[in-house]
Amino acid sequence: MTTPSADDARPATAGRAPAPEPSQPPQEPAPDANGQPPLLRLVGVGKNFGPVRALIDIDLDVPAGQVTALVGDNGAGKSTLIKTIAGIWVQDHGEILWEGKPVRFHSPKDAASYGIATVYQDLALADNLDIVQNMFLGRESLSRGRLLDEDSMELKAAETLKGLRVTTVRSIRQPVASLSGGQRQSVAVAKAVMWNSKLVLLDEPTAALGVVQTRQVLDLIKRLRDHGLAVMVISHNLNDVFEVADRIAVLYLGRMVAQAPAADFDRQSVVEYMTTGTASANGKG
Ligand SMILES: Nc1ncnc2c1ncn2[C@@H]1O[C@H](COP(=O)(O)OP(=O)(O)OP(=O)(O)O)[C@@H](O)[C@H]1O
Ligand SMILES: [Mg+2]
């Protein structure tokens, strides 16, 4: 087992002139908005898969109205972290606080009921259904009793897409199979927004996209933030990260080795945290 001890997560300062910055890696809690706790806070969260410690003692703040980028090398635990927040896994240790109160999400539906929406890389859209059908799929229980007719469903779907300025879709009655990758991401995100989500989790939303489509998705992420939602996005692409992130959180072998405002990092320090769990100079390298 090569998992580093907690001490390994700290920069080695011996033998170097003292850094002008604080000697701890950036671990700044998000400032509370108007005295309110952050929308989501993880305290000491751990998740094991048998002998594999996928998440170790994770502290993380995800504030509303900000984009938090979650970065880390392959296998660092990013998807596991998102799935734990989304209710797919229940943590083995630690606590999840939602609006300051301890919660336990036992299923994705449970997490969704708090306003957590997740857009996975494989998207979970039904290819054979059209955009409107997809945006209402799985929400049947919400419309039970006041059955929504096709017209009002169409209107709501169209308004949501328009509100997010998703304008490239030709018809909302188009099957999702006929959409481009970026359009599919946009529909998945719009679906999340339509159901009054407060936190949108995106796992590698631009990984399979070209330049133009990536732009659409990044713009969409910024719009969610501007609407006051909390957004947490996993990305391997540091261009994307530095373009959209207000905060950056770095996982290394299951541990959170740095989290702070994006302005406290530069590319080099992010890469160093991702690949070694520490950075030679703290924050901006
Ligand atoms: N369902 C599972 N069963 C057993 N081990 C798992 C499971 N899911 C993840 N793991 C393990 O947990 C660790 C973290 O995996 P995770 O998928 O969260 O990484 P990641 O940061 O999302 O990586 P990537 O960038 O490759 O997507 C890995 O060692 C992985 O093998
Ligand atoms: Mg992953």
Image (cartoon, rainbow, N blue to C red):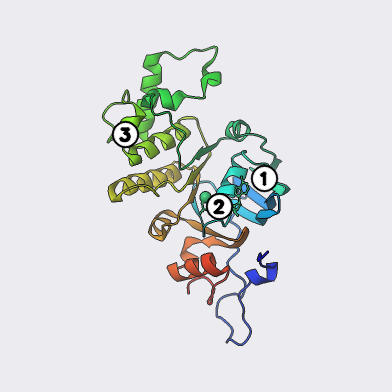
Q: Could you tell me the amino acid type at mark 3? A: Leu
Residue 37 seen in this snapshot: no
- First reached walking from the N terminus: tag 2 or tag 1: 2
User: Horizontal and vertical percent for residue 249?
Assistant: 54, 58
Q: Residue at x 34, y 48 (%)?
A: 214
Q: Could you tell me the amino acid type at mark 2? A: Lys
- Number of residues whose C-alpha sits closer than 10 Å to that of mark 1, classed few (under 14), some (14–19) or many (20 or more): some
Q: In the rendered view, does 241 fall on the left or right side of 103? A: left
Q: Quadrant of the N terminus?
A: bottom right
SS for callout 1: strand
Q: Residue at x 69, y 52 (%)?
A: 46
- Cβ of disc 2 within 8 Å of ligand 1? yes
Q: Is residue 121 above or below residue 5?
A: above
228, 181: nearer the viewer: 181
- First reached walking from the N terminus: tag 1 or tag 3: 1
User: Horizontal and vertical percent for residue 6?
Assistant: 69, 67
Query: In the rendered image, which residue does mark 2 sit on?
Result: 78
SS for callout 3: loop
Query: In the rendered image, which residue does mark 1 sit on?
Result: 97
Disc 2 to disc 3, C-alpha distance: 27 Å
> Are dots 2 and 1 in contact, CB under 8 Å?
no
Q: Quadrant of residue 251?
A: bottom right
Q: Is residue 13 above or below residue 99?
A: below
Say which mark, if any, is on residue 179: 3
Q: Residue at x 43, y 67 (%)?
A: 267
Q: Could you tell me the amino acid type at mark 1? A: Leu
User: Horizontal and vertical percent for residue 271?
Assistant: 48, 67
